[in-house]
Image (cartoon, rainbow, N blue to C red):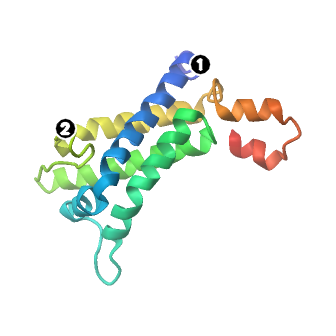
């Protein structure tokens, strides 16, 4: 079973593009008003501290840019293994936040896709788990570089330093 899932290049590329598209879409919808669409939402979760350092605001301001960078890199296939790990970590942060909110007996709009669709934490926790699973599939797949910019660069420049090749996966 493991071979069938992680060995299938088409399943890997679909997983990569799906996670990339979800993250990029969420980011693009947050960027027009980061303070309202991201920072305010992180405050509503009430998980990250605001004293003495406002980690909630820091996370809220960084999140849309991290989602965009990881999303576009996954779609294009740039540093695929590294950004698949990043996608999984973003998904994990979402699951932790959503899980804490749900364990507190609250259910709020997650702020995932502002202006497009209102989604409650109780619904999007499943999407966040899917982001983790599909990111893991890309991370562990031998075919993660199928139809990627990384693959094109490796073929065009075969004498790349080993550390660059390692980063590319």
Give the mark toward the camera: 1 or 2.
2
Q: How many labels does the image show?
A: 2
Q: Residue at x 53, y 37 (%)?
A: 74
Residue 35 circle label: none
The location of residue 25, given as percent across then percent down, is: 36, 39
Going from N to C along the chain, the mark reached first, 1 or 2, is 1
Circle 2 — which element?
A: loop
- Using residue 164 as the reference point, say whether residue 8 is left or right of it: left
For label 2, the crowd category at 10 Å Cα-Cα, with few meaning under 14, some 14 to 19 and many 20 or more, is few
Q: Position of residue 36 (x, y in %)?
A: 23, 60
Mark 1 falls on what kind of element? helix
Residue 99 screen position, x and y as percent: 25, 50
Residue drawn at x 46%, y 36% as measured from the top left: 20
* Residue ranking furthest to the right: 159
**Which residue is labeled 2 in the image?**
117
Q: Quadrant of the C terminus?
A: top right
> In the depicted view, which residue is nearer to us: 25 or 53?
25
Answer left or right for 88 relative to 153. Answer: left
User: Label for residue 9?
Assistant: 1
Whether label 1 touches label 2, CB < 8 Å: no
In the depicted structure, whether residue 156 falls above or below residue 100: above
Q: Is residue 110 above or below residue 126?
A: below
Res. 8 in view: no
Name the residue located 28 percent from the left edge and 76 percent from the top edge: 50
Residue at (85, 47) in percent of width and height:
161
Alpha carbons under labels 1 and 2: distance apart:
32 Å
Quadrant of residue 115 in the image? Answer: top left
Residue 76 is situated, as x and y percent measured from the top left of the image, at: 57, 34
The answer to whether one can see residue 90 in this image is yes
Q: In this view, does 129 lie above or below 39?
A: above
Which image quadrant is residue 37 in?
A: bottom left
Front residue (pair 93, 74): 74
């Amino acid at each position: 079973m493991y071979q069938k899932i992680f060995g299938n290049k088409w399943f890997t590329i679909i997983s990569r593009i799906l996670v990339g598209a979800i993250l990029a879409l969420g980011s693009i919808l947050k960027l027009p008003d980061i303070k309202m669409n991201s920072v305010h939402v992180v405050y509503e979760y009430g998980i990250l501290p605001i004293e003495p350092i406002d980690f909630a605001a820091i996370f809220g301001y960084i999140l849309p840019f991290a989602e965009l960078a990881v999303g576009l890199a996954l779609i294009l296939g740039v540093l695929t293994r590294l950004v698949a790990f990043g996608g999984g970590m973003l998904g994990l942060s979402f699951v932790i936040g959503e899980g804490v909110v749900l364990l507190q007996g609250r259910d709020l709009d997650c702020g995932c896709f502002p202006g497009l669709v209102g989604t409650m934490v109780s619904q999007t926790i499943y999407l966040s788990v899917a982001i983790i699973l599909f990111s893991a599939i890309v991370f562990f797949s031998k075919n993660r570089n199928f139809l990627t910019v990384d693959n094109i660069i490796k073929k065009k420049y075969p004498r790349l330093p080993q550390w660059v090749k390692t980063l590319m996966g």
